[in-house]
Image (cartoon, rainbow, N blue to C red):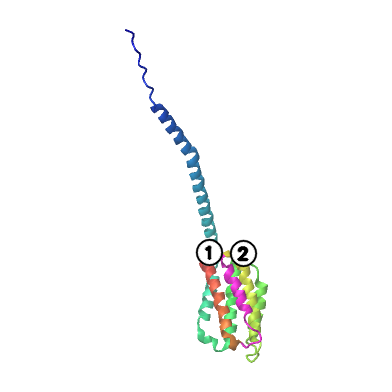
Amino acid sequence: MAEIKVEKKKSIWPWILLIAGLLAALYYFVIREDDAVLVDDMDDTEYVEEVEAAQEATVAAMLSETAITEINEYKTYISNEEKMGIDHVYSNAALERLIDATRAVTNALDVDINADLDQAQAYATSITKDPYEVDHANKIKDAGQIIAAALKKVQNQKFPDLSKSCTQLQNTVMAIDPQVETLNQKDAVKSFFDQAGDILTNMINQ
């Protein structure tokens, strides 16, 4: 009787293992690579944000103690609402303190606008020469426009996040009517002083 040979079935496990290995290699070289790129992109974004924050902190740190003192003195002065009663005295003192604070900031940050502030100082001084003059609002507005432009220049060079505030300050100055006595538009003048103080304070706190 002839012997019948039974051929053993070949195992499929080697093929399964081979396919699994190929899939694992595909994951490692393709999917993992995409994940790595995503992580790198996130790291780059975080790095840029950290650098920008560090630059702003460095700018704020450059403000001298003199600048910080001048800003705080100005903020303290304008916070006293009662001083608005004797208008030309209050406006003159507020403008002079604001000019001093602005000048100290520009000097600390090496932004050259001193000649402009000298003109603003002349307007501020002229307010007290004759308390019965009716053009105080005009001089306050002229000085305010110079100060607002100076702060805008500092903002453009050092504080990009304060652009909206500085533009609003310029609009507030423009709203002061030179044909109306200052005592009859105290709110407009006070709003200018307050907004300028807020911008200077934000420059300290950036």
Name the residue that disc number 2 marks.
Answer: 157
Given residues 104 and 188, the one toward you in this image is: 188
The answer to which image quadrant residue 194 occupies is bottom right
Residue 15 in picture, x, y percent from top left: 42, 28
Q: What amino acid type is highlighted by mark number 2?
A: Gln
Residue 146 visible from this viewpoint? yes
Residue stretch rendered in magenta on the structure:
161-181
Disc 2 on helix, strand or loop? helix
Q: What amino acid type is highlighted by mark number 1?
A: Ala
Residue 66 visible from this viewpoint? no
Label placed on residue 171? none
Tell me whether the residue at label 2 lies in contact with that at label 1, contact meaning CB atoms closer than 8 angstroms.
no
Q: Is residue 13 left or right of residue 59?
A: left
Name the residue that disc number 1 marks.
Answer: 61
Given residues 10 and 185, the one toward you in this image is: 10
Which residue is farthest bottom? 132
How busy is the neighbourhood of tag 2: few (under 14 within 10 Å), some, or many (20 plus)?
few
Residue 79 in picture, x, y percent from top left: 50, 80
Residue 154 in picture, x, y percent from top left: 61, 68
Relative height, residue 1 to residue 75 (above, below): above
The answer to which image quadrant residue 107 occupies is bottom right
Residue displayed at 55% across by 63% down: 59
Residue displayed at 65% across by 75% down: 146
The answer to which image quadrant residue 126 occupies is bottom right
Sequence-earlier tag: 2 or 1: 1
Residue displayed at 55% across by 72% down: 200
Query: Is label 2 or label 1 in front?
Result: 2
Question: Taken as a whole, is the magenta stretch helix, strand or loop?
Answer: helix
